[in-house]
């Protein structure tokens, strides 16, 4: 079995997608609406520079600042390649198991302090043969030799009234 860390390293050395959101700027604060203190719906995302030959997209949203290691907030794959926009409050593909033990979007909800939330989007040369509820490691292994490009958007969040 491949090492997921080495898979991530290999994926990082590829062409870049441009990921943005009309809801917040890169390295800016994620609005309350998209967190556990709001509606807890996913923010809208815009994906540009999708390379020719892309058959599907995958998305991993994670918090590397979580106290027990990286917390996976949202795993989605087999997003149609022509989806340059992922609308807010949507499920554009097949959802994997997040770190809360559920499928679907789990909004930012840091126990203390400000955390960083990365939205990583991958352009793939095929649809993935994974069923709903698969793990991040399974997703990374399936993407390993099929990733054409990757891009990331980072937002921050701190619960109101915490330091």
Image (cartoon, rainbow, N blue to C red):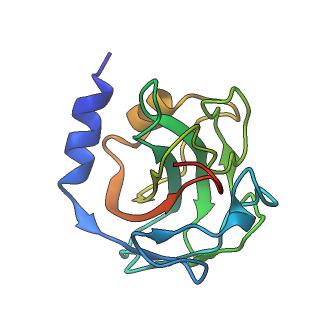
Q: Position of residue 6 (x, y in %)?
A: 22, 32
The residue nearer to you, when weighing 155 against 72, is: 155
The quadrant of the picture occupied by the N terminus is top left
Q: Please, is residue 2 above or below residue 20 in the view?
A: above
- Looking at the image, which residue is at 56% across and 78% down? 84
As rendered, which of 32 and 135 lies closer to the eye? 32
Q: Is residue 42 above or below residue 12?
A: below
Kindly identify the residue that appears in the image at 59 percent across and 43 percent down: 73
Task: Please give the name of the residue rendered at 67% of the width and 34% of the height, measured from the top-left corner.
Answer: 131
Q: Position of residue 60 (x, y in %)?
A: 50, 49
Residue at horizontal 42 percent and vertical 28 percent from the top:
69
Point out the residue furthest to the top here.
1
Residue 150 location, quadrant: bottom left
For the view shown, which residue lies furthest in the left direction? 13
Number of marks in the image? Answer: 0
The quadrant holding residue 43 is: bottom right
The spot of residue 21 in percent (x, y) is: 54, 78
């Amino acid at each position: 079995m491949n090492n997921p860390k080495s898979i991530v390293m290999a994926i990082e050395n590829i062409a870049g997608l441009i990921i943005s959101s009309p809801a917040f700027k890169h390295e800016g604060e994620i609005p309350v609406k998209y967190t556990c203190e709001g509606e807890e719906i996913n923010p809208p995302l815009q994906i540009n520079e999708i390379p020719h030959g892309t058959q599907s997209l995958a998305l991993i949203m994670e918090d590397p600042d979580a106290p027990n290691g990286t917390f996976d907030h949202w795993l989605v794959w087999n997003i149609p390649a022509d989806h340059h926009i992922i609308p807010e409050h949507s499920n554009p593909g097949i959802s994997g198991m997040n770190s809360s033990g559920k499928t679907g979007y789990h909004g930012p909800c840091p126990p203390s302090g400000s955390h960083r939330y990365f939205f990583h989007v991958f352009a793939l040369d095929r649809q993935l043969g994974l069923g709903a509820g698969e793990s991040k490691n399974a997703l990374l292994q399936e993407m390993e030799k099929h990733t054409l490009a990757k891009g990331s958007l980072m937002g921050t969040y701190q619960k109101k009234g915490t330091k």
